[in-house]
C-alpha cells in the first residue's frame, strides 16, 4: 500500500490516519461510531464528538494508524 496520510480536523484537533498502518481492529468505530464510521466516506467525521473524546479514542488505536495533533500546538 502506498504511503498515504489523511487528515481530518474539527478546528481544535486534527486526526491523522495512516491507512498502511491500520490493522482493522475496529476499536475506533466501536468506541466512537459518531466520528469513525467505515461505511461512509469520508469515514472520519471530526465534528461528531468533543475534542477530548476524539483524543481519548485515538489513543486506543493499537496499530498507531490513528494519531492526532492539537491545532494550537502547530499554529504560528
Image (cartoon, grey):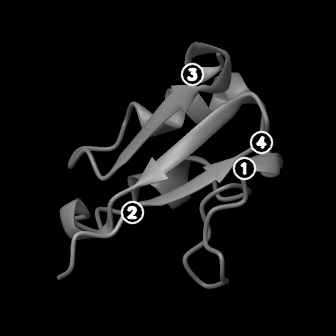
Q: Which residue bears the numbered disc 1?
A: 46
User: How many residues crowd mark 1 within 10 Å: few (<14), some (14–19), many (20+)?
Assistant: many
Residue in the picture at 57% in, 15% down:
73
* Secondary structure of the residue carrying numbered label 4: loop
Task: Judge from the rendering whether residue 42 lies leftward or rightward of residue 74; answer left or right.
Answer: right
Q: State the CA–CA distance, disc 2 to disc 3.
A: 29 Å
Q: Nearer the viewer, residue 65 or 53?
A: 65
Q: Which residue bears the numbered disc 4?
A: 10
Q: Earlier in the sequence, mark 3 or mark 1?
A: 1
Task: Judge from the rendering whether residue 28 lies leftward or rightward of residue 72; answer left or right.
Answer: left
Q: Which residue bears the numbered disc 2?
A: 26
Residue in the picture at 67% in, 16% down:
72
Q: Earlier in the sequence, mark 3 or mark 4?
A: 4
Mark closer to the observer (2, 4): 4
In this view, 63 is above or below 71: below
Q: State the CA–CA distance, disc 4 to disc 1.
A: 5 Å
Q: Position of residue 32 (x, y in %)?
A: 62, 49
Q: State the CA–CA distance, disc 2 to disc 4.
A: 22 Å
User: How many residues crowd mark 3 within 10 Å: few (<14), some (14–19), many (20+)?
Assistant: few
Mark closer to the observer (3, 1): 3
Q: Which residue bears the numbered disc 3?
A: 74
User: How many residues crowd mark 4 within 10 Å: few (<14), some (14–19), many (20+)?
Assistant: some
Amino acid at each position: 500500500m502506498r504511503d498515504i496520510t489523511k487528515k481530518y480536523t474539527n478546528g481544535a484537533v486534527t486526526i491523522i490516519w495512516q491507512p498502511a498502518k491500520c490493522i482493522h481492529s475496529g476499536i475506533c468505530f466501536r468506541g466512537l461510531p459518531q466520528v469513525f464510521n467505515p461505511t461512509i466516506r469520508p469515514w472520519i467525521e471530526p465534528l461528531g464528538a468533543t475534542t477530548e473524546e476524539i483524543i481519548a479514542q485515538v489513543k486506543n488505536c493499537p496499530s498507531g494508524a490513528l494519531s492526532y495533533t492539537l491545532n494550537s500546538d502547530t499554529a504560528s
